[in-house]
Amino acid sequence: MKKTLKSRPNWRDAYRALRHEIDNGILKPGDDLPTLTNLAAKSGLSVHGSRRVLESLCKEGRAQSWQGKGFRVAIPQISLVIATKNPNFGLNVAKLGIEANSEFVSSKMINLREKNAERLKPHKGNKVVLTKMIRKVRGRPIGVSSDYFSTTHLDGIDKIIAKTNSISKALFVFGVNEYSRDFTEVFCRPPTQHESLLLEIPKSQFVFQTRGTNVDKHRNPIQVSCGVWRADCVNLKIENEKA
């Protein structure tokens, strides 16, 4: 009897299977893809063939990879508007029809002389509270927000932010229902170790740093907002519309 030869696995079959799972939402943005060895074991491909599958997905923009982080489903690019009027993360992302949410991380009291705190111009002797939040799109972290508030008029705002996961709702409790961005500056830099952990990126992936002051309807500074945004999936747009 003649022995039937088994056909060699074709890398395109494994590629089509993963592409189908990505395109149909079975694998979601930010999800881990199989490692080279796991894909090889599952598909019967060599490690070289597995690399070809994953790198093909990267070339198409369906996946991304970083050294030491493996391969992941790519997070689609979004254009994040930093608006002069209503500088509200959730509101501005919602305009794009994309699900967004924020998660409170921590808060602490800091000295007035610390960087960014002096922009609030609080009364001498008063403390400033610093809150930190993770900004998410489609359930994945795309930014970290550090926000400074004077305790002169907003004492206890950090507790409300922790409860509501919303700065705008917390400001509303204090009677601030209208506020605007006084100025915004943007620059690019590597993330800190803590930022890379919160954003789930390696330290080699650059981030955008934004810094600006929000003012109330009387032009009094109420908040200094410093954002760190993943440069691999966020395009920043500064909207200069007058408040």
Image (spheres, rainbow, N blue to C red):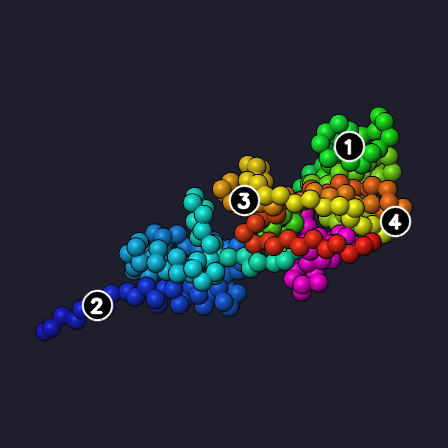
Contact (CB < 8 A) between labels 1 and 3? Answer: no
Q: Which mark is residue 6?
A: 2
Contact (CB < 8 A) between labels 2 and 1? Answer: no
Disc 3 secondary structure class: loop
Q: Which of marks 1 and 3 is nearer the N terminus?
A: 1
Residue 55 picture quarter: bottom left
Disc 4 secondary structure class: loop
Q: Earlier in the sequence, mark 4 or mark 2?
A: 2
Quarter of the image for the N terminus: give it.
Answer: bottom left
Find the magenta span and give its range: 81-103
Amino acid found under the numbered disc labelled 2: Lys
Task: Tell whether position 101 is magenta.
Answer: yes
Disc 2 secondary structure class: loop
Mark pair 3, 2: CA separation: 47 Å
Q: Residue 217 carries which label?
A: 4
From where the camera sits, is residue 107 visible? yes
Residue at 78% x, 56% y is 241
Q: Name the residue under label 1.
A: 118
* Circle 3 residues within 10 Å: few <14, some 14–19, many ≥20: some
Q: In this view, does 60 lie to the left or right of 195?
A: left
Q: Which of marks 4 and 3 is nearer the N terminus?
A: 3
Quarter of the image for the C terminus: give it.
Answer: bottom right
**Which is more foreground, mark 4 or mark 2?**
4
Residue at 44% x, 55% y is 33
Residue at 59% x, 43% y is 188
Amino acid found under the numbered disc labelled 4: Lys
